[in-house]
Structure formats: C-alpha cells, structure tokens
Image (tube, rainbow, N blue to C red):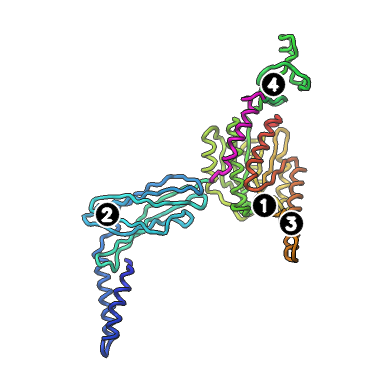
C-alpha cells in the first residue's frame, strides 16, 4: 500500500480542531481521530483496484547510439471489469535518461492503451529495467495499492562513432589509390593493374620484358594496392584507458579510432580483426567482412569498460597473434606515457615487429599540457608548469622507445587521433607497404 499527499492533510485538518476544542482529554480524542484516519486508509486500500491485474507489454528498440534519443512504448491493458486509474514509473537506471515524471494512465474496463517514455542514454553498454512500479489510489484518494510488475527490458547503447564524419574524404582518397583515378602505385608486393609505356624516372624493376618484346617499345607494369590484407586492432582496456581526456575517456577515443580504421579497411577489401584486452578478453571480433563488420564491432565494444588493473602485455599480444599469425598491420590503441609503467609494454612490443608487419601505436593525449608547461606566474603556476613539462618529457621518452622497437607512434587529441591513424593507413597503402 501507499499513502497519498491527501492523507496528512486529512489527518491535520481533523487533529487541529480536536486539540483546540477537545475539552479535558484532547489527546484521547486526537488518538481516536488518528485511528479513524487509519481505518479510512485501510478501507481505501481495500476498495482500490488491484494493479497486479494489469497486463504490461514493452516496445523498445534493441540498440541505440550513445546520445541519441529513443522512445519506449509501454502498453497497459485492463482485463478487469473496473476502471483503473493510477501512475506508473519504469525502473530504468539514471544513466538511461528517463524523465522524472510518472506516467499517468486511465484504463476503462477491457481496454489497453500505449504510453510514451522518452529515453536519452548517457552511458555505453547494456541498460536494463526489471520492473514497472504501479500505484493505484482508492476512491477516497487517501491511500492505495502499489505493485512491482516484472517486465524486463534491455537497451544496448552503442559507441557514437563521431569519427564517421572523416570517412567520406578518406574513402575518396582510397579510391584514388585503388585505381579509380589515374593515380597508381608501382612497386613490389601489390596487385597488377595494367601496362603502359615506360617514361624516364620509372622503376626499372617494373618493366615487363615480354610485353616489351611484343609491342616493340618498353612497357611497364602498373600496380594497385593489394586487397585481402589482414589488419589487427588491439585495444588496451586496462587502467590507463580510464583516464579522462577532454570530454571522454581514452577508451572512448580508442573506440573512435578503431571504428574509423575498420570502416576504411573494409572499404579497401582488407580483413579486420579486433580484440579489447587487459587481463581478459573484453571484446573480440574476427572472421566478419563486408557490411556486417561495423555493426559487429560497435555491438561488441558497447559493454566494454576500462578496468582498474594493469594490462598483461604478453597475454595481450598473444591474443593479437591468435587473431592472425602475421597481419599486415597491427594497430595498438593504448596510453603509455610513463617510462617505468611502460617497461612491460616496450619489452613485448618488439616481438610483434617483423618483416611484413607494420606496427602502429596510437595514444589519445591532452594537448593542454603544452600550454600549461609554458605557463608562468606565481609559485603555484611554476610548480604546475614543471609537472606538465615532466609529463611531456616522459611521453617523449616512451615515444622514443616505441620508435626504437621498430613501431610507429601517433599521439594526438581524441578528436584528431582517428583521422591521423586513418591517414597513416592510407599512406602505407600508397607506399605499397600494405
């Protein structure tokens, strides 16, 4: 049961005159009034329709992107012979963005009606509701019945993929590299495209001597970037990924970079494999090509959260090798900025660099450190600037260690890191290294 706001009003309206005019024993009369109000409340509860008789159905999309609005439809049915009026509240967690207002309903006998509940999720992952709380007041409006109607609902909130805006321009450049324009790539390890006459400055290793003898002039083979390459993306979901950079975490920036690179590589005809790892596999996508790749990636990454533990890099790189023993490109999205903490990472990274495999390490950074390091003022500002300069120097030392291991390092803001990694992928295509 529950008491409405009318209950204390009725109680107060009766007690005040009783105490003032009750004679020699006002408290006895006041107690009798309280008992009477309790009896009226009990009668009201007994006379109220039973909310457990309601039939509840939920219509909800299975997936939505983070930040997008979605509408849940609650269908309430009244199979009884009595009219049921009341209020209902869905038990979504706060990050689902459900309104604070309750749903007011009025159901005639034997009818059902739909009610809209707007949601605007504020967190990735699976948002759940297990029940609907329903309150039905009695005819006096003093009290009523309350029930929790079990109606489970699940809404999977996907990464927003804001970096999609960079995809169209990169795909246009990819088409140029892929032979849609006159731009061609010449060199070894690429697919044969066509023959043309040799001009001064061309690589003599690409001369086709049989075609030269057949046409009576020096003929050159032109090449296009090879398809069917394997790109492995390793996302570090350890404690460093929980650091906030800008408005989001480093893990969110890694997701944006991974999704843009995967979408671009899929357009290029390459195979994309992904694993998110710290000391356990948090997400894994492999063996999916074509248009189904991107939905599979966002669905797998949706529930992944940064874990407050150090990443086991031996096991992480073993997981990457398990996806493909010799990928053409390995992209590691992590945050390694302290030489002491990065010792395990740098010691293992060299084992992944081999002939035929390009290793790229991407890190989302806060470029505000450079401005802070240049700040001057009072003693507090100088200490803060010194700390920022020390952080930048540590990051430079880690970057130098990555380069010494034979890998490439890219560090930029969360907004600029995804397009820079995509540009590096295109540069490798253009150079014939991928």
The answer to the question of whether label 1 and label 4 lie on touching residues, with beta carbons closer than 8 A, is no
Which residue is tagged 2?
107
Q: Give the mark toward the camera: 4 or 3.
A: 3
Quick one: label 3, few (<14), some, or many (20+) residues within 10 Å?
Answer: many
- Residue under label 3, please give it: 373
Q: Earlier in the sequence, mark 1 or mark 4?
A: 4
- CA gap, disc 2 and disc 1: 55 Å
Q: Which quarter of the figure is the N terminus placed in?
A: bottom left
Residue at mark 1 to residue at mark 4: CA–CA distance: 43 Å
Is 175 magenta? The answer is yes
Looking at this view, name the residue that lies furthest to the front.
377
Query: 35 above or below 95?
Result: below
Magenta region: which residues? 159-182
Magenta span: predominant SS is helix
Q: State the residue position of label 4.
A: 222
Cα distance in 3D space between marks 3 and 1: 12 Å
Secondary structure under tag 2 reads strand
**Is residue 87 positioned above or below 194 on the image?**
below
Mark closer to the chain start, 3 or 1: 1
In the image, is 155 to the left or to the right of 379?
A: left
Q: Residue at x 42, y 45 (%)?
A: 61
Q: Is residue 336 visible?
A: yes
Whole-number angstrom distance, CA of label 3 to CA of label 2: 65 Å
Q: Which residue is mark 1?
A: 366
Of the two numbered discs 4 and 2 on the same chain, state the one appearing first in sequence: 2
Element assignment for label 3: helix
Check if mark 3's residue and mark 2's residue have beta carbons within 8 Å. Answer: no
Residue 317 location, quadrant: top right
Q: Residues within 10 Å of mark 2 (few under 14, many from 20)?
A: some
């Amino acid at each position: 049961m529950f008491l409405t706001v009318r209950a204390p009003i009725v109680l107060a309206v009766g007690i005040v005159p009783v105490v003032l005019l009750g004679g020699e024993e006002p408290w006895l009369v006041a107690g009798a009034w309280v008992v009477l109000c309790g009896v009226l409340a009990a009668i009201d509860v007994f006379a109220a329709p039973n909310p457990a008789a309601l039939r509840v159905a939920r219509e909800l999309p299975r997936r939505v992107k983070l930040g997008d609005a979605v509408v849940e439809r609650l269908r309430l049915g009244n199979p009884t012979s009595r009219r049921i009026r009341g209020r209902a509240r869905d038990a979504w967690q706060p990050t689902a963005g459900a309104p604070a207002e309750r749903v007011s309903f009025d159901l005639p006998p034997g009818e059902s009606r739909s009610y809209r509940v707007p949601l605007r999720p504020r967190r990735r992952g699976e948002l759940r509701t297990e029940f609907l709380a329903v309150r039905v007041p009695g005819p006096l409006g003093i009290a009523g019945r309350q029930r929790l109607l079990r109606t489970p609902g699940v809404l999977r909130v996907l990464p927003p993929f804001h970096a999609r805006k960079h995809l169209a321009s990169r795909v246009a450049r990819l088409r140029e590299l892929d032979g849609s324009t006159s731009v061609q790539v010449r060199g070894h390890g690429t697919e044969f495209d066509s023959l043309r006459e040799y001009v001064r400055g061309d690589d003599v290793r690409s001369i086709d001597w049989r075609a030269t003898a057949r046409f009576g002039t020096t003929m050159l083979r032109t090449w296009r970037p090879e398809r069917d390459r394997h790109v492995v993306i390793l996302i570090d979901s350890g404690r460093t990924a929980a650091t906030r950079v800008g408005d989001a975490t480093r893990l969110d920036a890694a997701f944006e970079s991974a999704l843009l690179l995967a979408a671009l590589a899929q357009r290029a005809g390459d195979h994309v494999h992904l694993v998110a790892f710290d000391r356990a596999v948090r997400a894994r996508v492999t063996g999916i090509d074509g248009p189904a790749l991107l939905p599979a990636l966002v669905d797998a990454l949706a529930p992944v959260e940064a874990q407050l533990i150090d990443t086991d890099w031996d096991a992480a790189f073993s997981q990457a090798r398990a996806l493909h023993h010799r990928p053409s490109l390995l992209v590691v999205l992590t945050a390694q900025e302290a030489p002491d903490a990065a010792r395990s990472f740098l010691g293992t990274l060299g084992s992944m660099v081999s002939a035929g495999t390009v290793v790229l390490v991407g890190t989302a950074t806060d470029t505000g450190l450079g401005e802070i390091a240049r700040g001057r003022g009072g003693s507090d500002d100088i200490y803060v600037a010194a700390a920022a300069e020390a952080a930048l120097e540590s990051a430079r030392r880690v970057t130098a260690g990555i380069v010494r291991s034979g890998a490439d390092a890219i560090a930029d803001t969360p907004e600029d890191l995804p397009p820079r990694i995509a540009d590096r992928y295109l540069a490798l295509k253009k150079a014939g290294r991928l």
